[in-house]
Image (spheres, grey):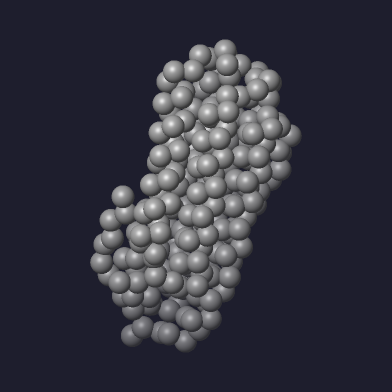
Amino acid sequence: MPIRTGLDERIKDVRAELKEYFAEAKTAYSEAIEAFTKLDSEVYKEVKKIRQHAREVNWDLTNNLLLILALNQPLMKDLRIVAAYLRSVDTIERLIRHARDIARSDRSLDENATELPDVITESVIGMHKHLNSLIDITSNCFTDVEEVPASELSDVWGKIKAEHKIAIDALSTLKSDTMGGKSARLEVVNIVSRVERSAYNLVRLCSLWHHALNNENIIID
C-alpha cells in the first residue's frame, strides 16, 4: 500500500533545493563564460569550488529522493516525477562540471592566447545567452511543476544549434595562430562543445519532464 504521508512535503523540500542547484549551475557557467571572453584564468579556482559543492549537493539530493522511494512507495505518476528529479540532479551536476571544464580551458587560453577572434567569442556568448534561457525554462518546469513550453524550448535550442554551427564553421577555417596555437585551438573547441552538450542535456531533461507529467514522449528538434 503506497504511503503518501509526508510525500508532498518531502517533494516540496526537494524542489526548493533544486531551485538553488539550478541557480548555482547558472552562476558557475556565467563566471566561466565571462572568463573566456576576458581570457581570465583566475576564475577557475572559484568554479572549482562550486563544482566541489555541487558534488555534495548531488549526494544529498540523491539520498533524499531515494529516501522518498523507500518511505513513501509513490504511485506511478509520483514515481515518474521522482525519477525525473533524480535525473535532473545528475544533469545539473554535469552542467557545473562542464562549467569547470570551460574554466580549466580558460586557464590554458590565458597562458597561450592574447586575443580570440570575434566570431568565436560572439558565438559562444550567444550560445551562453540561450543556455541561460534553457536553464530558466528547465528550472521553472521542475521547481514550479509547469508543463514544458515545447515551442519556446524548440526555438531556443534551434538558436543554440545555429550559434554552434557558426563557431564550428569558423574553427574549421581559422588558423591556429589566431587563437594562440594548436593547443589553444583545442581548448576553444572544448569550450564550444561543452556549451552545446550542456544545452542538449537540458533539452533531453525537459523531454523527460514532459513524460513524467503526461506519460507520453515529446520530440524537441
Where residue 90 appears, x then y in whole percent?
Answer: 48, 53
Q: Is residue 11 above or below residue 166?
A: below
Where residue 178 appears, x then y in whole percent?
Answer: 57, 16
Q: Is residue 83 visible?
A: no
Q: Residue at x 36, y 54 (%)?
A: 154
Quadrant location of residue 86? bottom left
20 left or right of 203? right
Q: Residue at x 44, y 44 (%)?
A: 160
Where residue 146 appears, x then y in whole percent?
Answer: 44, 72
Q: Is residue 202 visible?
A: yes
Number of marks present in the image shown: 0
Quadrant location of residue 31? top right
Q: Residue at x 40, y 41 (%)?
A: 161
Q: Nearer the viewer, residue 57 or 158?
A: 158
Q: Nearer the viewer, residue 62 or 137?
A: 137
Q: Is residue 77 above or below residue 42?
A: below
109 left or right of 135? right
Q: Residue furthest left?
A: 216
Q: Is residue 64 above or below residue 109?
A: below
Where residue 216 appears, x then y in whole percent?
Answer: 25, 66
Quadrant location of residue 215? bottom left
The N terminus sits in image quarter: bottom left
Q: Residue at x 57, y 65 (%)?
A: 19
